[in-house]
Image (tube, rainbow, N blue to C red):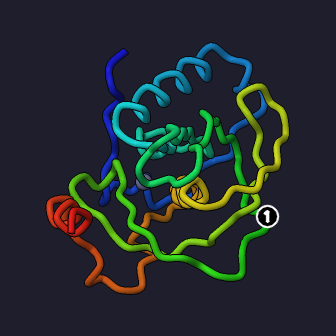
Amino acid sequence: MPILPRTEFGNPILRREAKRVPEKFLKTKEFENLVRAMFQTCRMLGVGLAAPQIGVPLQLAVLEVPAGDGRSRDRGYPATVLVNPKIVAHSAKKVLGWEGCLSCPGMRGEVPRYAWVKVKYTNESGEEKTVTVRSFPAKVFQHEIDHLNGLVYIDRMKDFKKLITEKEYIRLMSR
Ligand code: ZN
């Protein structure tokens, strides 16, 4: 299966609130194929992918943080399908961390995010789930849920001097 083409910053679909996924869509072959293709693209290129990033205006995202990922000091996060997710509680404080986005290749930004979030969502089988996630996976959840609400990471940045190229990011990290 080929990697899905991505929409990039500037595409209006990334600036619109995505539509709720109807429950009946979860039982279709089309949904199954879409999720499979999204996971494949996500695993090839990063740790999370939201449907608007492949031109599908639905409240749907996939994420998976491999164990031993350098950005995550914990054991990673298992493959998860988020349907109609909502942040229902979060930490008082935010922490700064570097983020990139498949819709803005070659750039990184330092973004404040809640240290932990409690998220309610429906999974691919139609089951209601509530999870509390912290550290790097919490950032991934917040980044992907933002995409479903028409937000991208630069909207959360406080200091645009911390918007840098991938090349400079690698140089910074290797210091
Ligand atoms: Zn993104």
Position of the C terminus, as image quadrant, is bottom left
Compared with 26, 11 (above or below) is: below
Q: Is mark 1 within 8 Å of ligand 1?
A: no
Side of 111 relative to 134 (left or right): left
Position of the N terminus, as image quadrant, is top left
Side of 76 relative to 160 (left or right): right
> Depth check: 72 or 9 in front?
72
Give the x, y percent position of residue 27: 74, 19
Q: Which residue is depicted at the point 52% across and 42% down?
A: 65
Q: Residues within 10 Å of mark 1 (few under 14, many from 20)?
A: few
Compared with 131, 93 (above or below) is: below
Side of 162 relative to 59 (left or right): left
> Depth check: 26 or 62 in front?
62
Give the x, y percent position of residue 4: 35, 29
Compared with 92, 82 (above or below) is: above
How many numbered circles does the render carry? 1
Give the x, y percent position of residue 173: 26, 64
Q: Which residue is mark 1?
A: 88
Q: Which residue is depicted at the point 39% across and 62% down?
A: 99
Give the x, y percent position of residue 42: 43, 35
> Depth check: 138 or 4 in front?
138
Q: Amino acid at mark 1?
A: Val
> Depth check: 141 or 169 in front?
169
Side of 97 relative to 126 (left or right): left
State the SS at label 1: strand
Q: Which residue is depicted at the point 33% across and 40% down?
A: 6
Location of ligand 1 given as a quarter of the image: bottom left
Which of the 4 quarters of the picture holds residue 174?
bottom left
Q: Which residue is depicted at the point 66% across and 41% down?
A: 82
Compared with 41, 94 (above or below) is: below
